[in-house]
Amino acid sequence: MGRLSAKIDYEEIRIARILENQAKLASLGLNKTLADLRAVASSAKSVKSHVRKAPKIYYSGMPLRRSSRLTKASTTESPSGHDSLRRSNRLRGISRDTISLPQGKVGVSKKNREEETRPANMPLVKVTALQAQLSPDIMIQRCNSKSRGSVYSPVFGICCHFCRQKKLCGEEGCKRCGNLDIDEPCIGKTDCSVCHSSNGVLCRACLKVRYGEEMDEVRANKNWMCPHCIEEKGINPKWICNSSFCLKKRRMAPTGIAIFRAREMGYKSVAHLIMDELQQTQNRRR
C-alpha cells in the first residue's frame, strides 16, 4: 500500500507541474506566438507545393527524340540502295574490292593497294590524318630504347611475336617508325624469308634474349628463317619457338623470365636451353 500511495503522489505532482508551466506560457503569450508560427509554416508549405507541381506531359503524340546523325541517315540512301545506318559492308552488299576511302582519309599505300605478299615487318594499315600525326616530343623519345622501343603506337607499331609489344622501334634509320611511312619496312623487327608471317616478327631484345641472335646479322641475312620454318623444314627439329603461345600449343609450360637461369647454366639464350632440355628428354626415353 505504501508503494501505491507513493505512485499516486508522484502523478499528482507531475500533473500539477504541467498545469503550472502551461499557466506560465499563457501569461507570457507564448501560446499565441506558437499558433501564429504554425499557421505561417503551414501556409508557406501549401504555396510551395503548389508551385512545384508540374503539368503532366504525354509523349505519345510527340516525335521521337533522335540524334541528328540518325535523322540525316534516315532521309538519305546509300549508293547500294540500303539505308545509311551503321552497318558492316558485308551486310550492305559492298565488296572489299570496291571500297574507296572517304575524303579526309589518308590512305596510306602509295604502291599497290591490293593485299599482295608484304613482309610481316611492313604490314598495310589504314589510318586517318589525325592518327598519322604524332607530337615531336613523342618522336624524340622513340630512340631512347633501341631494344624494344620507347613509344607505344597501336596504329604504326608492329607486334612482336614474343613480348606482344606494339611499339615504334628505336632504330635511328627506320623510315617507317621515324617518318610514319607504312610503305617502308620496320628495320627494328625481323621478317622470315619463308613465311613472312607474324610468327617471324621479333624485336631486337627478344631476338637476342630468347634466341641468341643479333638484329644486325639477321637484317643482313636475306635468307633468315624463323624457328617455326626451321622446324617445319627439318633443319633443326629441336630449335622451336619459345613464346608462351607456341609452348602452350605444345602443352609445355611457358618459361617466363628464364634468361638468367639460361646464362647461369652457360647457354646463349632461352632457345638453346630448351633445345638441350628437349634433347636430353628424348635421350632418356630411348
Image (tube, rainbow, N blue to C red):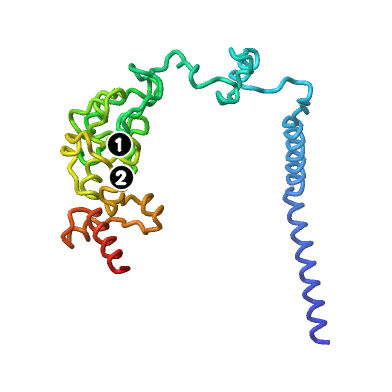
Left or right of residue 168: residue 52: right
CA gap, disc 2 and disc 1 = 10 Å
- Foreground tag (2 vs 1): 2
Q: Nearer the viewer, residue 107 or 49?
A: 107
Mark toward the start of the polypeptide (2 vs 1)? 1
The location of residue 131, given as percent across then percent down, is: 37, 25
Frontmost residue, 248 versus 56: 248
User: Which amino acid type is shown beneath numbered disc 2?
Assistant: Lys
User: How far from the left and from the top, in percent, is residue 3?
Assistant: 79, 84
* Residue 108 position by quadrant: top left
Which residue is rendered at x = 32% and y = 23% of the image? 133
Q: Is residue 68 above or below residue 21?
A: above
* Image: 261 above or below 39: below
At x 20% / y 33%, what residue is drawn? 171
Q: Which mark is residue 15?
A: none
Given contact means CB atoms under 8 Å apart, are the residues at marks 2 and 1 in contact? yes
- Name which residue type carries label 1: Val
The front one of 263 and 119 is 119
For image coordinates 28% across by 45% down, the residue present is 230
Q: Which mark is residue 233?
A: 2
Mark 1 lies on residue = 194
Q: Residue at x 22, y 49 (%)?
A: 209
Helix, strand or loop for disc 1: loop
